[in-house]
Image: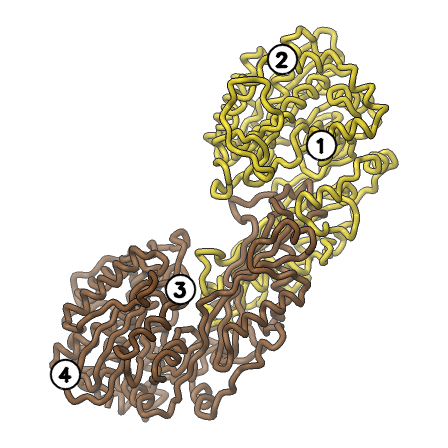
Chain colours: A yellow, B brown
Amino acid sequence: MKNRFIVALVLIPALSVVALSQSAATVAARKYRKENETKLIRNYLELLSIPNVASDRENIRRNAEYLRKELERRGLAPQLLTPGDRDAPPAVFGEYKVPGATRTVVFYAHYDGQPTDPADWTVTTPWSPQLLTEAIEKGGQKATMPSEVPLDPEWRIYGRSASDDKAGVFTILNAFDALKASGIEPSVNLKFFFEGEEEAGSPNLRAVLTKHRELLRADAWIIADGPVHQSGRKLVSFGVRGVTSASVTVYGANRDLHSGHYGNWSPNPGMRLVKLLSSMKDANGRVLIEGWYDDVEPLGVLERKAIADAPKYDDDLRRELGLAESDGNGRELLDLLNEPSLNINGMKTGNVGALARNVISSKAEAVLGLRLVKGNDHWKQLEKLRKHIVSQGFYVIDREPTSDERLKHPLIAKFIPETSGYNAQRTAMDLDVSQAVIEAVRNASGEMPVTLPTMGGSLPLSIITEALEDPALITVPVVNYDNNQHAADENVRIGNLWDGIEIIANVMTIR
Amino acid sequence: MKNRFIVALVLIPALSVVALSQSAATVAARKYRKENETKLIRNYLELLSIPNVASDRENIRRNAEYLRKELERRGLAPQLLTPGDRDAPPAVFGEYKVPGATRTVVFYAHYDGQPTDPADWTVTTPWSPQLLTEAIEKGGQKATMPSEVPLDPEWRIYGRSASDDKAGVFTILNAFDALKASGIEPSVNLKFFFEGEEEAGSPNLRAVLTKHRELLRADAWIIADGPVHQSGRKLVSFGVRGVTSASVTVYGANRDLHSGHYGNWSPNPGMRLVKLLSSMKDANGRVLIEGWYDDVEPLGVLERKAIADAPKYDDDLRRELGLAESDGNGRELLDLLNEPSLNINGMKTGNVGALARNVISSKAEAVLGLRLVKGNDHWKQLEKLRKHIVSQGFYVIDREPTSDERLKHPLIAKFIPETSGYNAQRTAMDLDVSQAVIEAVRNASGEMPVTLPTMGGSLPLSIITEALEDPALITVPVVNYDNNQHAADENVRIGNLWDGIEIIANVMTIR
């Protein structure tokens, strides 16, 4: 990371001048962090040790209560926001009014994390956060908290949500503390909104926002989530992809059968599933489902320029990820992110490994993940998928087949669409606040950030624009891109946490 | 089952006369069983409660020791046979010499069972055998041992190896006890051979047989394993299919990736796997791999007649299994069993269900099961499969790819062939002993059994013919065909255990 940073300064000498004049917010954030490094990391490890899968309601409430107290301690008038009429992980809300400020900005992060199988983790388990001297892939070793500061910024913290997205919560709260410690008043009224079920698809967010729309009134939302650019340069993003998914189950006989006594005769649902799935994409990853790309809203001139100006990093990325070729017929990653995607998130029939056995399973299941771009409707995109399955000869239902249905239809698919999907969102890049945030990140990081019309990941931002009065939504990610987010061995680079505090402190003092 | 039996008698009046004259062995076996029903089942539940996966060496030895004591108690001079030079589940051997007998017959069964995931079981766990009043699918309820006899023959015992193949051990030992109790001397010298790693592919059987070939000298082996015919009629089989398998792993990036940030660009190994697997078979289950069917040795006239004479049961079977169509373009099950098969035994990438997440997994794996027929060589068949993967553009290796290989080859497959596969085996149906065994089963069951040149399942019989002096190998299955063998909820119908004792007692007294 360090080397890349230096290279970037050398390559862009015009910007290096800017890098030398630090803003008051940057100075304050750095000073505060240097005086408190050990304490900040200890507190963060404490937060990371609370299990945070949205469906684990008991623990998710422990997280919410922890954050409520953190806001209370700072005098930020915390409230736990819920839809009221049903059980849901609460959003933790807080507020800080600045005398004379005319603008209000909400700082968003989510405190829940993706479900994960502890058995897949290498150096620790998901909620026993562990310091390493570097990334595992680079030979990082387990370490304990050093008695001396400064901490090495290349060190990592491994644990679920170390990056996604308790890092957002961490940087927001510490940026606020840093400004306060230096007596710097934010330039805008601050609101804090920490969501508790983003990784579960934000099923109650719309209801929470609608119920509390007065409380949440703001000119802009700053979304502290997602990784910085693969080149290591900071990033400001003006949109996110939408997301949804569907599970597809296909059937063979009504019970598992011995593969010897019935092999060649009883249909293998695994084979039926692979034939169905392989019909959905070509060898280059292009989706073959009818109309898949039809609704995509074309990018404007400014958005296309932002993509063209972004660092060319695909070759490096392929090398790092061990890929001889990427999908997309030679097109670049940042270009391809502006198209809807289809991914096999998971697939299972029978068993592999030690539990493998000679059996024709009675069913085979896949979970398909869809990413959506501006113009796509998530329900419409799922319907294209469903129709494709029908077009492949399947009788498609939304429950287990009955005995009669089994005897009538050779090919049966159970298709269960996700009910909590949402659409993509995009904020105009030429708004005043958009330009002010770009400038704030440039102040903090000393170089022009990469700006993107959309990130690859998804956040329920369309829900916010739809439920509230269309505030500007600007995503300011801080964590390292090689953070294994959503997978086992999720981690954050400590240097990125430090940078994040400076970035958010600058955004809290935009002009 | 009962109804089918009656129908068969009505349809074949010539045989019903035979059915009325019971052999001395049948009378003895029935008498003994009726006097001891509760005790026999209690003992069987004890045997079934010892976990018996071959790789679980501690428990597999407990099974062997249990059986050694059973043989000792009967004065059968037990020995535990091992290859000697390595750790292996022992085969339990015993012997009973009959003065004046000129022929020697080995009675074979295996006491190990298929690995299984306890979470998949419905009414009990694999090694907590449970009585049910009927099959689960037919509404069977949990039951405890009744105080009154006779037991209802429709009752089932659920548990791993209840059918496959501790039922073989059970019927052999109780048939011997029954003859002894009535003072009937077997017509042949008896040897007992209970294998402990058949479900693991019998990796040490060849070494054990070769080492102990003098001890195991015999004219014929009777294999008590596998289910009776789907019609409910008894079965004598003169061959078995061979079996082997291979695991295939394909790769994407060298770590799991966020499906949003990299979707459309980073190749999905799940998609690569489904494209590879779907190239292997057509929609009717015909294998498309080059030369797959080339080596098959055609059936002789007598074998074809046996298949033609077997009951037509495919329609009933489809109805019972909930299948609108079977594979094979309209050909019958018994016909298709004489061809080599290819089955997706298991397949996995990422997760489905509660652990599903939005990730591009770094790899996808499948385990492919192959069944072989007379003429196939298991190594040659695996090599055809490997060549097919190469023909699909994959760089095929037998270990994890190196970083250099990842960067050089867009498509990489790890191909791990099973090392303990074996070939098919077939005994001539016109041998004296073949005809005598058919007659013995007819005596016991009161009707002509179905006779088949091969069963669908596999047993390491080719290893026996290759290691010993080519004894006749005749399979005499006893358990119900709907026993879920190799799957969760394995079970045996108690009536089939009773029939099995009578059948084996008749085989021990062949003329």
Instruction: Report the residue marked by disc 2.
Output: A32
Which residue is the site of mark 4? B184
- Image position, residue B445 (x, y; %): 28, 82
Q: Are marks 1 and 4 on the same chain?
A: no
10 Å neighbourhood of mark 2: few (<14), some, or many (≥20)? many
What residue is disc 3 on?
B200
**Residue assigned mark 1:** A232
How far apart are the alpha carbons under marks 1 and 4? 87 Å
| Residue B310 position in % (x across, y down) | 42, 85
Using the rendered image, report if marks 1 and 3 lie on a common chain: no
The amino acid type of the residue labelled 2 equals Tyr
Camera-near label (1 vs 4) is: 1
User: Residue B458 falls in which quadrant of the image?
Assistant: bottom left
Q: Is residue A270 left or right of residue B308?
A: right
Between A82 and B186, the one lying in front of the other is: B186
Label 1 neighbourhood size at 10 Å, few (<14), some (14-19), many (20+)?
A: many
